[in-house]
Structures are given as structure tokens and as C-alpha cells.
Amino acid sequence: MSSNIPQDALFKDPYNELFDRMSNYGAVLLRRGQEDEALQWANTASAKYPNSEKWKDFYLAVINNRVSRFIRADQTTEARTFLESNKHLLSDEGYFQINLSLLDSELLRNATQITNINEGEAVITAIEQARLQNHLSQARANELRNFAIQKTASILAAPGGGIPTGPNLKIAITYLQNIIAQYSSTRELDQLLRTYQNALAADYHNRFAAEWNKGNHAEAERILNEGLTEFPENRQLLNNRATIERSRR
């Protein structure tokens, strides 16, 4: 008498079949976004049905999903705590994979929150360390570093978010010149440097004009000479010099 049961079904590994069914339940929890429940379930089930390789794959999916949700909610601190507390459940490769994504988000968040030069330098140092450890590509490190430098320079130029003034512009310009010399120039940093330099030259012009129009010619000339020392080819400042020379004829 022939049997209707497929022959290969007679030789299935019951353990693997049971694990597949358990995995399906875990997958349902993941699809629902219930990572915490999935993690608790996996901890209980893995204690009764150990299979290190298959459970590590499942744990990788659970932890990656939860960390990703933390990142999307801009909760990188919570993501880091969650990842580190569950690191023992992951393979070295799995941890490295999730850590790369989280580290990128942490660095970007820290750069966004820069409020002074010390914080800016700390973020830039962290970016460079991540690059040297192969946690960031060179291109991504350059992108994050440029952003951190621009944020730091903008704070130096206008502390408290006010209008940039001459002395603060000088500080920002010096900072940019030094950082470009250290890390090499980029189109974005060169453009920002020119913007600040043009703003500082305009500040010299405005201060010159204010004093000149008040009749304080000596002070106006002092301001102009200071500006021309820094920007000897600036057309607006050279026109101011011509104004002084015409007045002496």
C-alpha cells in the first residue's frame, strides 16, 4: 500500500521544524514592531531550545530593528544603552554592523548640538578616531567633519546666534584657516571662509564710513589701515583709501 505522505517529510529534523515555527512567531512580533517582546520571548525560548547560530541571527534582527527605531526617534543615547546591554547576544560581526550605523548617528547628533569650540574639537576628534578605526569611510568622515567645522565656525562668528561682528569674525576666520591647514581644504569650507572674510571687510568699511561721516577722519583712517592690512586687495576698502586721498588734495 502506497502512502500519501511525501517521503522527505518522513526524514525532517523535528528540532529544526520546531525552531522554524518558533522563528515564525518571532518574525510576527518583529513585523508588529514589538522588539522588546520579541527579545523577552527569545530569551525564554533560547534557554529551552538552544541553537547559538540561529538565535544569533534572530537577535541580530531584533536588536537592529530596535536600535534603528531609537535612531529614527533621535534617541541615540537610548540606542547606545540598549545595544551595549544586549551586546552579549550578538556575534562580533553582528555587533560591529549595528555599531557602525549607531556611531554615525551619534556623531551627527553630537555635531548638530555643538555650542562652543571645545565641543566642536571633541566631535572632530571623535570623527577622526572613527575613521582611523575603519568605523567610517573617508568620504563620510569628510562629510561629518565639514559639518562639525561649519557649525563650530558659525558659533564663533555669532555667539548666541546674533549678528556676526568684526572681532568674532576674526576668531572664526582664524579657526577656519587653522582647521583647513590641518585637514585640507574643501569647497564648502573655502566658501565659508570667503564669506566670513567678505563680511569682515564689509565691517571695516562700515566702521570707516561711520567715523568718516562724523568727521573723525583720524579714527576712520586707522580703521581703514587695519582693514587694508588684512585685505589689501579689497575693492571697497581701496575705494575708501581713494576717498581719503581725494580729501587731501
Image (cartoon, rainbow, N blue to C red):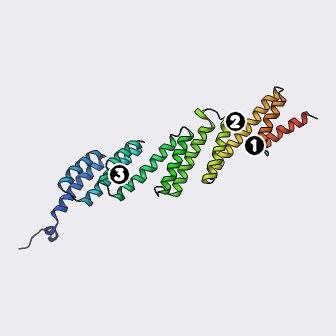
Relative to residue 217, is residue 184 drawn left or right? left
Q: What residue would you read off at disc 1?
A: 230
Q: Earlier in the sequence, mark 3 or mark 2?
A: 3
Please, what is the three-letter code of the amino acid marked with disc 1?
A: Glu
Q: What residue would you read off at disc 2?
A: 166
Location of the N terminus by quadrant is bottom left
Distance from disc 2 to disc 1, alpha carbons, whole Å, reads: 12 Å
Q: Position of residue 33 (x, y in %)?
A: 31, 46
Q: What residue would you read off at disc 3?
A: 64
Which callout, 3 or 1, points to the residue nearer the camera?
1
Element under label 2?
helix
Q: For residue 9, which quarter of the picture? A: bottom left
Please, what is the three-letter code of the amino acid marked with disc 2?
A: Gly
Q: Earlier in the sequence, mark 2 or mark 1?
A: 2
Q: Earlier in the sequence, mark 3 or mark 1?
A: 3
Which callout, 3 or 2, points to the residue nearer the camera?
2
Relative to residue 199, is residue 111 drawn left or right? left
Distance from disc 3 to disc 1, alpha carbons, whole Å, reads: 53 Å
